[in-house]
Image: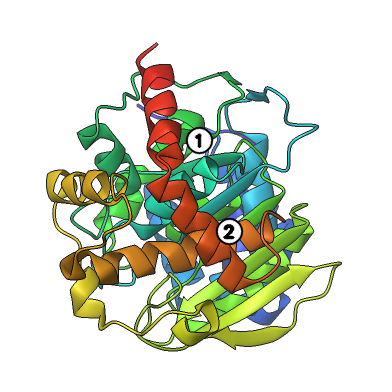
């Protein structure tokens, strides 16, 4: 039988009561304290865990940057420690979305990360298997022959590398049953982009709701990211949209101006979202393999997917300082594909993962 005799346990009830009764006074330190209790085995009653997760959801804690940053900080402190070979010298970047937008699009951030890596950018992507879509980033890479049997404690100096999130955040398993039992997403569903153990210096981060844009940009700043672009396609997608405008929040030199992007600003034509809908992992892997083997003559059927990837890769290239403008980023990304260097970056990672 579980024991709840720890003298600190009653404090969790006080923190929970504060969150429920006066959420406007619920602070970052309150959240850090609550998470300490949550991630200490057998310290909190199951019904209190469920109540706390529900209260976090009802009070939209994910829209408060100081709470986002605090939660991310706690999870990174408790994550598996990794050493990034050359991490002090390289400007490591990541491109990732929070997920949960419900559109089931092609795995564009994974493809864009590979393309940017082929263009000379150091990309360490932190991701997971599918939760709400048919194919997550890990599912896609596994379908391409990459392996994730164990966590990598040292990340080799290769252009592209992937970290499977559950391998690096074992403490989240303590509350996984309670999260799965709830019929809604909580703050822990959107923290993934903020808790990479590789500590990237630059990021393109997608959110599915406009009100999350500025909080996530501020959370990135608070957690040490120096340059980032937070994006939200106006259709409610956590990517740069190939169909129309995308809201943006650009973090640079500590400032976060809000703006927007449009395919025309990349020198590309818009494409309806239904032309870039994803399938299962095998179908997406086949499409990515075809895309990365293009040699200049682009079939019309491939144009929407190609442009979708080029836009998101171009944004990452700008964040990484590899391109000065989005139109230049598209040219650099296209050259990465047709030269075969993007495919080489994927092949290098595949061999590394199998070792």
Q: Nearer the viewer, residue 20 or 270?
A: 270
Quarter that holds the C terminus: top left
Please report whichever mark, 2 or 1, sits nearer to the chain's N-terminal start.
1
Q: Position of residue 329 (x, y in %)?
A: 58, 63
Residue 36 in view of the camera = no
Q: Residue at x 19, y 70 (%)?
A: 300
Relative placement, left or right, of 201 versus 153 is: right
Residue 76, quarter of the rendered image: top right
Count of numbered badges drawn on the protein:
2
Q: Position of residue 46 (x, y in %)?
A: 38, 47
Badge 1: residue crowd in 10 Å (few <14, some 14–19, many ≥20): many
Q: Disc 2 versus disc 1: distance between alpha carbons?
A: 13 Å
Q: Is residue 270 above or below residue 136?
A: below
**Tag 2's secondary structure?**
helix
Q: Position of residue 147 (x, y in %)?
A: 31, 24
Quarter that holds the N terminus: top left
Q: Residue at x 24, y 43 (%)?
A: 289
Q: Is residue 272 above or below residue 6?
A: below
Q: Which residue is mark 1?
A: 160
Q: Position of residue 281 (x, y in %)?
A: 18, 46
Q: Residue at x 43, y 41 (%)?
A: 342
Q: Which residue is mark 2?
A: 316
Residue 49, which numbered label?
A: none
**Tag 1's secondary structure?**
strand
Q: Nearer the viewer, residue 296 or 124?
A: 296
Badge 2: residue crowd in 10 Å (few <14, some 14–19, many ≥20): many
């Amino acid at each position: 039988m579980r024991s709840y005799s720890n003298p600190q346990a009653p404090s969790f009830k006080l923190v929970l009561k504060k969150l429920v009764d006066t959420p406007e006074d619920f602070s970052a330190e309150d959240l850090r304290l609550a998470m300490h209790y949550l991630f200490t085995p057998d310290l909190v009653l199951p019904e209190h865990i469920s109540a706390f997760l529900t209260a976090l959801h009802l009070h939209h804690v994910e829209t408060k940057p100081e709470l986002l940053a605090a939660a991310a900080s706690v999870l990174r402190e408790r994550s598996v420690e990794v050493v990034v070979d050359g991490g002090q010298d390289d400007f490591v970047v990541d491109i990732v979305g929070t997920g949960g937008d419900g559109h089931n699009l092609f795995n564009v951030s994974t493809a864009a990360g590979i393309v940017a890596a082929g263009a000379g950018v150091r990309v360490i992507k932190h991701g997971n298997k599918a939760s709400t879509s048919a194919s997550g980033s890990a599912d896609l890479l596994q379908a391409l022959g990459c392996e994730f049997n164990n966590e990598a404690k040292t990340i080799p100096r290769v252009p592209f590398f992937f970290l499977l999130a559950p391998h690096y955040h074992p403490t989240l398993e303590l509350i996984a049953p309670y999260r799965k039992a709830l019929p809604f997403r909580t703050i822990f569903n959107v923290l993934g982009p903020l808790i990479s153990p590789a500590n990237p210096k630059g990021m393109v981060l997608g959110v599915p709701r406009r009100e999350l844009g500025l909080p996530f940009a501020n959370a990135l700043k608070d957690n040490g990211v120096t340059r980032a672009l937070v994006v939200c396609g106006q259709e409610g997608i956590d990517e740069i949209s190939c169909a129309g405008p995308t809201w943006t929040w650009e973090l640079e030199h500590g400032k976060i101006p809000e703006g927007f992007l449009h395919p025309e600003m990349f020198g590309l034509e818009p494409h309806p979202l239904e032309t870039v809908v994803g399938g299962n992992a095998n179908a997406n892997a086949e499409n990515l393999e075809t895309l990365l083997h293009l040699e200049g003559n682009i079939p019309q059927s491939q144009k929407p997917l190609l442009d979708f990837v080029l836009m998101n890769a171009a944004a990452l290239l700008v964040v990484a300082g590899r391109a000065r403008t989005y139109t230049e980023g598209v040219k650099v990304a296209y050259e990465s594909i047709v030269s075969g260097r993007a495919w080489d970056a994927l092949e290098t990672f595949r061999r590394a993962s199998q070792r």
